Image: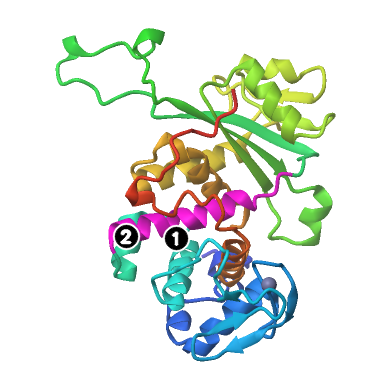
Amino acid sequence: MNKVTHKPKGQHFLLSSKAKTLSIVKVSNMTEQEVFSLFCQLRWGSETDVTCPECHCQHNAYFISTRKQWRCKHCKHTFSVTSGTIFAKHKLPLKTYLFAVAIFVNAVKGISSLQLSRDLGVHYQTAYVLANKLRKALLEHRDTSPLSGIVDMDGTYVHPAPRKENKKSDRLDYRLKENQNPDKRCIVVAREHYTEQEKLADKRFQGAKRSCVFVTYSETQSVVKKIADSIVTRGSKINTDESNAYDVLIPHYDLRTVNHNLEYRSDSGITNNQAESYFSRFKRMYYGQNHKMGNTYLLNYANEAAYREDNRRKSNGWQFNDVLEKCLETSNQNNEWVGYWQGKRRHQEVLIQ
Ligand SMILES: [Zn+2]
């Protein structure tokens, strides 16, 4: 009888201990002082040399230990570790924010506000605003430097058609322009590949390295050109599907197409699978977790999926610190999430047209 031999396989990153450097239990075991120190470290890199949010002077401010606040020696302004940040005037204990960030980063396909409200024991409205503050911080701190090398580009439609009528005779033909859902939007993604050298240097570096997302009405030539001009270095290789909207890129880019009606991978090895894999995660997040995404904040959700996809091979402890740091670097000025449920909300969408 032939002996069956199994080739030793490398352990998947997500199964390794390197991927799991944070847990809810760890957060739960943190003392109040440890929580406070973490906020100070991530915001200022120090507990003593703090920066006054009013006059922006970094110094050893007078610490009022009973209130866990500082008084600026220059402008006499009194401030806390969250003053001026997206968590300013927080009503929940600091630790609850750590729980929220930990639950958020561990939910690799996104999390609904209802689930977050159950996990944190807070009202739905509180959880909704909190999750959206994290999304705002991620969006404001996204890397918008140009992509280069090999870039996959593609678009997918959300809210394409309203629910179908019961009777077939009552159903409209949604392919016709006049019957289209006015809420229909297109998410366009551009994803830069890891270079061959990067892949050789670290086996975690596979597939796409960085993604940029945009929301638009439709994947037209003018929109595609605007997006490529804003984010992709000229001369880069762009992989797309057969949509003729991308033909407009031919003069300035090395455009390579794969015809999905015939194949997913051309004979010369061209795919736009990195764009497809982003859409796959985004749609699982949409249908499986969030269920509803308003168009006003569609870009925030799309960017959340891009962040999760780009950092899929980084430990959850790294992601936890990164998200928290971004929140503490996000200013409370023009914060649309203050007074959201009191009606102070933004109605304009962020669209490329
Ligand atoms: Zn000051």
**Number of numbered discs on residues:** 2
Q: Residue at x 48, y 56 (%)?
A: 133
- The three-letter code of the residue at mark 1 reads Ala
Q: Position of residue 290 (x, y in %)?
A: 36, 48
Q: Secondary structure at mark 1?
A: loop
Q: How is the image coloured?
A: rainbow
Q: Quadrant of ligand 1?
A: bottom right
User: Magenta stretch containing residue 125, yes or no?
Assistant: yes
Whether residue 109 can be seen here: no
Amino acid type assigned to the residue bearing label 2 in the image: Gln
Instruction: Identify the residue at image location x=39%, y=26%.
Output: 183
Is 172 magenta? The answer is no
Q: Main secondary structure of the magenta part?
A: helix
State which tag comes first along the sequence, 2 or 1.
1
* Residue 198 seen in the current view: yes
Instruction: Work out which quarter of the rendered image holds the C terminus and state it.
Output: top right
As displayed, is residue 246 above or below residue 274?
A: above
Q: What residue span does the magenta drawing correspond to? A: 123-144
Q: Quadrant of residue 193?
A: top right
- Residue 162 relative to residue 154: left or right: left
Above or below for 104 versus 91:
above
Badge 2: how crowded within 10 Å, few (<14), some, or many (20+)? some
- Report the front residue among 256 and 137: 137
Q: Position of residue 257 (x, y in %)?
A: 68, 23
Instruction: Name the residue tied to disc 1.
Output: 107
Q: Position of residue 64 (x, y in %)?
A: 56, 88
Q: Residues within 10 Å of mark 1 (few under 14, many from 20)?
A: some
Q: The residue tagged with tag 2: helix, strand or loop?
A: helix
Q: Nearer the viewer, residue 237 or 99?
A: 99
Q: Report how far apart the C-alphas of labels 2 and 1 lie in the structure.
A: 11 Å
Marks 2 and 1 close (CB-CB < 8 Å): yes
Q: Which mark is residue 115?
A: 2
